[in-house]
């Protein structure tokens, strides 16, 4: 595990070009690893450019150890539906299975009640990505839908956590 005292989670502004480049590079490493796990599939996030990432309306939060970027979570708030979507949760491959993803997910779930009277947190991941599914299930998420995406028909599972009504 990463030393929790050394890990700090901050909002990150992807309109700052150097930050967008840094997050994009982490996304490419993490999503390439997930694509390999899923059998070499070409995942949609691997097609995203730095410019597209910088224009995202999502809120981004970075897990930092000093100046080192260890992970990033992006969330989108659907106010009418009272849902928070976790649109990405990526961890530097060399830092995986060390608690960074858990801390980012816990941060997002703690952040959610501060936003509004949201009732549901949602996320989607590769249906064969057992480590990611196990992480979400450990935080009380349950599967509610399955679909395929992309030209390679990648199986995706959607999970949700009901917070309250």
Image (cartoon, helix red, strand yellow):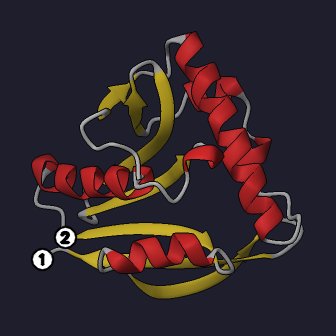
| Residue at the extreme top of the image, as rendered | 17
Asked where in the image residue 42 lies, by quadrant, the reply is bottom right
Real-space CA distance between mark 1 and mark 2, rounded to the nearest whole angstrom: 5 Å
Q: Is residue 133 left or right of residue 162?
A: right
Q: Which x, y percent locates residue 85?
A: 39, 59
Q: How many labels were placed on the picture?
A: 2
Instruction: Mark 1 and mark 2 in contact? Answer it, CB < 8 Å.
Output: yes
Q: Which x, y percent locates residue 73?
A: 44, 45
**Residue toward you, 20 or 78:** 20
Q: Which residue is mark 2?
A: 119
Q: Residues within 10 Å of mark 2 (few under 14, many from 20)?
A: some
Q: Quadrant of the C terminus?
A: bottom left
Q: Residue at x 58, y 30 (%)?
A: 23
Q: Which residue is mark 1?
A: 164
Which secondary structure lies at badge 1?
loop
Q: Which x, y percent locates residue 68?
A: 49, 25
Question: Which of the two discs, 1 and 2, labels the residue nearer the N terminus?
Answer: 2
**Residue toward you, 90 or 142:** 90
Q: Which x, y percent locates residue 151?
A: 88, 66
Position above or below: 49 against 146: above
Which secondary structure lies at badge 2?
loop
Asked where in the image residue 99 lies, by quadrant, the reply is bottom left
**Residue toward you, 15 or 91:** 91
């Amino acid at each position: 595990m990463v030393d929790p005292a050394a890990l700090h989670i901050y909002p990150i502004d992807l309109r700052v070009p150097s930050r967008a480049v840094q997050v994009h590079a982490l996304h490419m490493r993490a999503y390439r690893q997930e694509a390999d796990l899923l059998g070499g599939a070409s995942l949609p996030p691997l097609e995203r450019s730095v410019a597209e990432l910088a224009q995202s309306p999502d809120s981004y939060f970075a897990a930092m150890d000093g100046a080192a970027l260890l992970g990033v979570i992006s969330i989108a708030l659907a106010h009418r539906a009272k849902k928070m979507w976790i649109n990405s949760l990526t961890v530097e491959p060399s830092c995986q299975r060390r608690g960074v993803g858990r801390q980012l997910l816990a941060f997002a779930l703690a952040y959610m009640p501060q936003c509004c009277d949201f009732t549901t947190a949602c996320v989607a991941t590769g249906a064969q990505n057992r480590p990611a599914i196990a992480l979400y299930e450990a935080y009380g998420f349950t599967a509610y839908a399955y679909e395929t995406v992309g030209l390679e028909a990648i199986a995706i599972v959607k999970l949700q956590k009901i917070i309250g009504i």
